[in-house]
Image: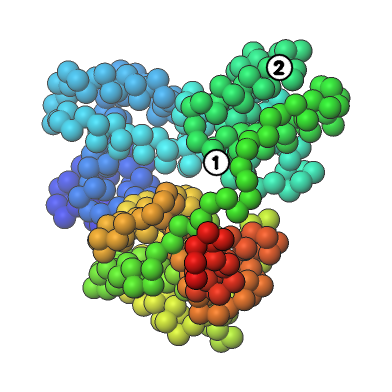
Amino acid sequence: MFPNYFESKGRIHTLCNSSGGSLLEGFAHDLWQAGYAEITGRRHIRAAEHLIYWADQNGIRVDEFQEQVLSRFDNHLIQCQCSGYGHYGRMNLVSGARLFMGYLHGAGIIDAFGAEQTVQNPVLLTSFCEWMRLRRGTKDSTLCTYSISIRDLLKYIGDELGRLDAKSLCQFVLDTSCKQGLAATKNCTTALRMFLRFLIAEGKCAVNLADAVPVVAQWKLSSLPRYLQSEDVERVIASCDLGSPIGRRDRAILLLLARLGLRAGDIVQIQLGDIDWKGAWLSVTGKSRRQTKFPLTQEVGQAIINYLQDGRPPTDATALFIGSRAPLQAFANHCAISVIVAKAMQRADVHCPSGGAAHVLRHSVATSMLRNGTSLQDIAVILGHRSITTTQIYAKVDRPTLQLIAQPWPEVQP
């Protein structure tokens, strides 16, 4: 794989005959498969070569590479005097060396790299996650959210369950609510209740302790859905540069949000096999792993085809949408989709009325459907709401219909 990154035959010969030539060759292959550009790949290979040379000079074997070795290499770069190796761009060199160690770990040459940096979960938290997966089938993304609050609680009580009582629970929630918003606090109380149910099931706390978690005050249907006008939505979609692969990808994503009302998390999980081109259907696995079929309209389908034919990078990943920077892989989570939408709104000079730009488009399509005469029941089906109560919030923005039923204020003459 060296010829993919180097033109000089002399340079390739030097790399192949170096002490870590075979490892560097494998590393170069990994970089190429991940989609690293030539200039970036050369820089990372050079960093790996420098690391191996420095390790040889200090009697460090490759199979001994670990986080502390990388830290020593970083300190070495500050005063590097190695002949033929520069130390400029130290952070880039360390980044390349870290990637190389990651390759060594994947190849089974070194043990778990970066284990010192991994946050070790408390035993109780680990047991809770296993219990939730087994008993409730909870997804890892949900458990990751729960773990934040539970880990803080265990620090708060010092891992001593004997200190866990109604007073300490209330105080913990109150202290936490002062540091974050309403939604995060509600997530916290939900996580605590689930954790306490686990402890009750395991006989590690009082049976009624779960009732001591305070309820966060939030009245149903008290807020208005944040949405964009139809013309603003079209401007956001039109802001994508169809002459670039990223623009074709972003337009397909925006259409799935603005036409089908998908969630950002739904888009991240779409696989290539979820598209039935012959039947013009798109299968989406939403919340609670419920699978829903959406009609693949001509506009949305053509946007996806344009992306697949001339936009999606070559990769073995099965996810429909792939990041544009190496390593070329599926998006890690829904946040990447919201970033794409937020950038599109900036390009279109459209103000986002709330946080979570991707969800604003979901609200917008629901609001538009309601104003065009679609019933709340149909909207609930399209949005994947379990209860019509969740969909009723959109009735508050249907001003023409509300004006028909609104009664005049008693003190105002008609």
Question: Can residue 378 be seen from the camera position used here?
Answer: yes
The residue labelled by disc 1 is 183
Give the image's coloring scheme: rainbow
Q: Measuring 44% from the left and 61% from the top, which residue is drawn there?
A: 227
Left or right position of 231 against 299: left
Residue 167's label in the rendered image is 2
Left or right position of 240 against 358: left
**Spot occupied by residue 140 in the image (x, y as percentages of width and height):** 62, 44
Q: Measuring 15% from the left and 48% from the top, which residue is drawn there?
A: 10
Q: Measuring 55% from the left and 84% from the top, which residue is drawn there?
A: 280
**Spot occupied by residue 21 in the image (x, y as percentages of width and height):** 31, 41
| Mark found first going from the N terminus, 2 or 1 | 2
Q: Measuring 36% from the left and 45% from the top, which residue is drawn there?
A: 27
Task: Classify mark 1: residues with Cα within 10 Å, few (<14), some (14-19) or many (20+).
Answer: few
Left or right position of 66 against 17: right
**Alpha carbons under labels 2 and 1: distance apart:** 23 Å
For badge 1, the amino acid type reads Ala
Task: Classify mark 2: residues with Cα within 10 Å, few (<14), some (14-19) or many (20+).
Answer: few
In the displayed structure, 353 sits above or below 148; it is below
Q: Secondary structure at mark 1?
A: helix
Q: Secondary structure at mark 2?
A: helix
Of the 4 image quadrants, the one containing the N terminus is: bottom left
In the displayed structure, 176 sits above or below 226; it is above
